Amino acid sequence: MMSFNPILLPMLVLVCLTFLVWIYLFALRIPEIKFKKIDPERLRDRAEAHQLLTTSAAASNNLKNLFEMPILFYVAAMLVVLLLIQDTLLVRLAWGFVIMRMVHSAVHCTYNRVMHRFIAYFISCIFLLLLWIRLAVYLLSS
């Protein structure tokens, strides 16, 4: 039986965050399309859709963001699991990344103040960079 790796918890939380933003996006987008009486065929072009769907644009952009830097997090987390690495610092860095991504999403999907969003994004990237440095040191010293 495989032992539980604590890095799975922040990974699952990030997956939940992604689905929450996805649900939030459609909770905004579908009523916006109906209210503005937009023919869904007009949304085929991403640039035009972005211009038409201003109310849900931030949530849409945030969902896209959750498939950018987090990919590196998922890869690192899966390496930790596959290689059976048990490292408290890696787990703390993972939580730091995920918590800052949660802050980033909260700002992005609500009042969307760019500097607040950027600070959360930047700090999350520092956590991710440190996580990868720690993982690289572990892998190269094994």
Image (cartoon, grey):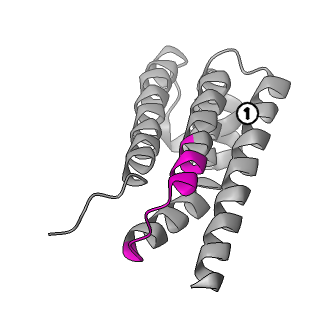
Is 13 on the left-hand or right-hand side of 118?
left
Q: Which part of the image, by quadrant, shows the C terminus? A: bottom right
Query: The disc labelled 1 sits on which kind of residue?
Result: Ala
In depth, the one of 42 and 58 nearer the eye is: 58
Which segment is the magenta one? 82-95
* Residue 78 in which image quadrant: bottom left
Callout 1: SS? helix
* Residue 122 in which image quadrant: top right
Give the prevailing secondary structure in the magenta stretch: helix
In depth, the one of 73 and 113 nearer the eye is: 73
Magenta includes 89?
yes
Visible in this render: residue 57? no
Vertically, is 42 above or below 116?
A: below
Residue at 69% in and 49% down? 127
On the image, the x and y values in percent for residue 112 come to 72, 21
On the image, the x and y values in percent for residue 86 come to 43, 63
Vertically, is 131 above or below 102?
A: below
On the image, the x and y values in percent for residue 46 come to 64, 48
Q: Which part of the image, by quadrant, shows the N terminus? A: bottom left
**Mark 1 lies on residue:** 120
Is 58 on the left-hand or right-hand side of 4?
right
